[in-house]
Amino acid sequence: MSDKNSVNGAEIMEKYEKESRTRTFPNRFLNRAVYVLCLAFTVYHLAYASGIRLLQMVNIKHHAIHVGLILVLGFTLYPAFGKSSRKKVVWYDWFFIALCAVMPIYVFVRYPAFISTGFSGDAIDIVMGTLLILLVMECSRRISGPALTILSALFLVYALMGRSFPGIFRHRGYTWHRVVTYLTTDIYGIYGTSIKVSATYIVLFIIFGDVMNKCGMGQFFNDIANALAGHTKGGPAKVAVLASGFLGSINGSAVANVVTTGTFTIPLMKKTGYSKEFAGAVEATASVGGQLLPPIMGAAAFVMAETLGVKYGVIIRAAVLPALIYYLGIILQVQMRADKDGLQGLPKSQMPKVRDVMKERGHLLIPIVFLLYMLIFSGKTVIFSAFWTIMATIAVAQLRPVSRMGLKDIGDAFVSGAKSTVSVAIACACVGIIVGVCGQTGFALNVAHAIISIGQHAIPGSAAASLFLTLLFTMVTCMILGMGLPSIPSYLITATIAAPALVELGQAEIAAHMFCFYFAMFANLTPPVALAAFAAAGLSGGSPMKTGWQSVKLALAGFIVPFMFVYNPQLLLEDVTVAGGLQVVATSCVGVLLIAAAVEGYLKGRLNVAMRLVAAIGALLLIDGGGKTDLLGILCLAVVIGVQMMKVRMVPADNAV
């Protein structure tokens, strides 16, 4: 990567990912102190995951240490305002840091009292709990922006003033004492599920991702994608899809993924003839899709497993086919655009060879295989598996000079992992306020009933129409809640508020949660708040809004896939036979092909409006897994192909395109 591209990438990250705007300290002592603190943060979490008996403790104590450390790092690394100094820690931040450091100590000291009083809380608990809530909200505002902080504040108001709300949203109302006690002295609020997944799963897989990046996994993904697809028609766009998918499945940040791979792929796409907006959209949609793709899914797979109380392997099995279909949709549109516009790939002589890439860095796949073995076949816990995968990565990296890491490299990766964790972890802590209020007031069930009620009353007496409208309302709810938030907090909020509606209508829990997860992720692509698309536009020089809408077109298969697995759970490989699995794969691929043809207006030649409409109808028919609708969908494909073949025969050979 050139220096120019590196600077540009850093600028894009800071512009569209607020979490990247950290302080850098010219003061050597302060810089060293932050380094040591980040290193201690990582070492503590690795030691805890390793099962050292000395560090085993009740959940609330571990969660309190985690929250205390991320708050200290948050107020150290992030200034209060955009124009504040980013080279020193101001006096009031030192005050906040001291308060944050006291919080875990307070939990350790007061824990016996929490137990003896049944977590009822006394005056000092209310004071300290109030301070904790304010610190979490302020730190979240600095790191992630105002959206999550405002949302959590509104939920606090809702908890206090429930008697003033109309209709089904009315509740008994709670005193500040009850609210603070619930949110801060037990494992239902800030120290609840969202921080549990942050303190156990998320932190470890972020560290794993940073260790993998440090030893050259990002370069390996880029090289292997170039070797496989760089020379094919529209090659640079396919390279962007493959490289971003590989990397995104591990690093979990759509914007970071756009900047990491887009710095290479977007200029190449533009060079081969793709428009600025299309090049940016390809990178954005592929980067967002990485969070849907196993094995790690940006750590969301582990969050979902914890929320549903199922094994990790169940989530992987359910996620793999929808994710591959999503990427198939992007690849097909890229191919059709290349065919339609006559775009070629890069010279094969300039592309690396698969054999050479595998020989140089192929050993870096060993930790991923090891991780899958540990999680799916070994029977070990996710935490234990993640710890040993990190250790295995460090060991495997030493096998070849190109990936070998010294102690400083390992330390730098650990420090980078700690810094990367802060933004997600503090968002999870703030989400804990929202989730806690939902649990205390019953808000989530009320929203579920409201969504279902709207769907039922819109078209009375039609169960199928009611389900479809409920899905639409759930989709809109998820995308609004997911605007501008990191992926995991987005999923946690939407799963808490919107998923119960689908479960109440008889849908499987895993399908409901996966549906919410998909649309929470797609908020990164959909204007007016489309951070991944806007970041890609910053690299391509295209219009941010046009790039966002082009991203929606490219991701259209992804918008339809969640409806497909709700209507046809076999797509999630739930209770499916081999024959049934093959059938659902085949019909899904046909559906995605028709979507791509309808969007691009091309299938073995340009499609007129009528044929694009037939293709779109066929794709919609294939959403339902019924035999009749599948046959009608395939018939639509046959009609489109038949008409195209007739056009080719009617064009004289010397005029054929």
Image: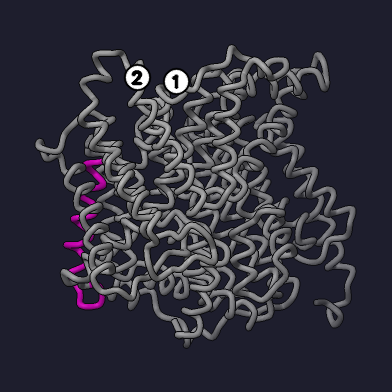
Residue range (magenta): 381-403
* Mark 2 neighbour density, 10 Å: few (under 14) some (14–19) many (20 or more): some
Q: Quadrant of the image for the N terminus?
A: bottom left
- Near-viewer residue (115 or 361): 115
- Kindly indicate whether the residue at mark 2 contacts the one at mark 1 (C-beta within 8 angstroms): yes
The residue indicated by pointer 2 is: 121
**Residue 507 seen in this snapshot:** yes
Vertical side of 24 occupied by 601: above or below: above
Q: Residue at x 26, y 47 (%)?
A: 386
**SS for callout 1:** helix
Mark 1: amino acid: His
Residue 177 point in image, percent of width and height? 44, 20
Report if residue 170 lies within the magenta region.
Answer: no
**Residue 381 seen in this snapshot:** no
> Which of the 4 image quarters holds residue 547?
bottom right
Cα separation, mark 1 vs mark 2, equals 8 Å
Vertical side of 385 occupied by 163: above or below: above
Q: Is residue 116 left or right of residue 644?
A: left
Q: Is residue 321 left or right of residue 591?
A: left
Vertical side of 31 occupied by 305: above or below: above
The colour scheme applied to this rendered structure is one colour
Q: Residue at x 68, y 52 (%)?
A: 526
The residue indicated by pointer 1 is: 177
Vertical side of 6 occupied by 399: above or below: above
Residue 224 point in image, percent of width and height? 41, 71
* Mark identifier at residue 448: none
* Mark 1 neighbour density, 10 Å: few (under 14) some (14–19) many (20 or more): some
Mark 2: amino acid: Gly
> Which of the 4 image quarters holds residue 461?
top right
Residue 358 point in image, percent of width and height? 32, 71
